[in-house]
Image (cartoon, coloured by chain):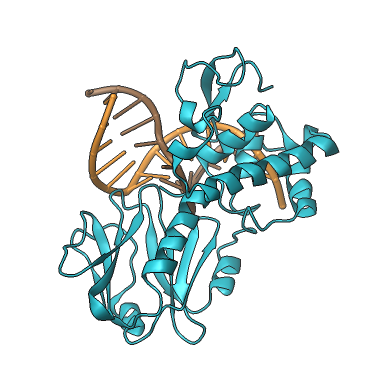
Chain colours: A cyan, B brown, C orange
Amino acid sequence: MPELPENERQRRMLESECLNRTIEKAEIGSDADHIELPGSNSLGRLKGHRFSEARRHGKNLFAGSQSGPWIAVHLGMTGWIVAFDAPDDPPDYTKLLITFEGDRRMAFRCPRKLGHVRVIDDPDEYITQQDVGPDALGIGRVTFCETIGKSRARLKSALMDQSRMAGIGNLWSDEILFGIGLHPERRGIDLSDDQLDELFDMMRAKLEKGVEVNADYSQLPTDWLIPNRDEGGDCPRCGGTITNTKVGGRTAYFCDSHQS
DNA sequence: GTGATTGTTAGTAA
DNA sequence: ATTACTAACAATCA
């Protein structure tokens, strides 16, 4: 379940459960057809190394060390990483299984196979190669206002464009626009400087809260969109109705009253 | 059966 | 160059 807050939660999990243990084995799970995973040569490179650091950049996740190889993980729509101890069995849909010293194991599971894992040498170089913009919680106000303010694309699409900034997907883009009261089909180029400023602040506030509650939606304020993201429901903030439309091929939920 | 799903990419078109 | 639209990937659920 990965947008920026969900991905940060995964990063924390890796950090607390999977660092500083020597890798004994990295293997492909069963049912791993039609998904991009490292070949045996790449997997072999991991053996004997340790992950000393877990990083997040947008929806990308990295684990590795300065002198050793890194894994670059993208969770796709339904990917998830689980840490557990042998002899417990890996969960369903495990595509890649890493066994560390001391029975600790890390499973990359991915039911819909839309995620992937790669073995790389340098996360920074990888981010550049992949044309991924700055992390949405790392992008500066000036850069944000510039890239959104010059864009003729619809706001929702612009926020979700991983080359502009990385980490915002369907749910959180809706949440941000709901918070600021802008319709998802508005254009960045039509916003005033003040509106761009407020949008930047709103993006940070929403994502920071999402990170703070560790992407546990039950802990989000009840007047936010995500807990009320149902077609036809009442807007928790005004007398409006939650409705939806297609933007960029995704379903955009918004309040028909206070978002314009 | 139909349509939808927290993501990305390729192809096409304007 | 930028943006929009569609389909595709695959599994599952309402």
Query: Eyeballing the image, is A230 above or below A153?
Result: above
Query: Eyeballing the image, is A174 above or below A151?
Result: above
Q: Image point 54% across, 70% down: which residue? A: A126
Residue A172, quarter of the rendered image? top right
Question: How many labels, in total?
Answer: 0
The spot of residue C1 in percent (x, y) is: 72, 52
A38 displayed left or right of A210: left
A49 displayed left or right of A192: left
The spot of residue A200 in percent (x, y) is: 72, 44
Residue A20, quarter of the rendered image? bottom left
Q: Quadrant of the C terminus of chain A?
A: top right
The spot of residue A103 in percent (x, y) is: 22, 75
From the viewer's side, name the closer residue of A160 and A175: A175
From the viewer's side, name the closer residue of A128 and B13: A128
A118 displayed left or right of A127: left
Residue most extreme to the top = A239
Q: Image point 66% across, 19% down: which residue? A: A258
The spot of residue A47 in percent (x, y) is: 31, 84
Query: Eyeballing the image, is B2 above or below A61?
Result: above
Q: Image point 55% across, 56% down: which residue? A: A58
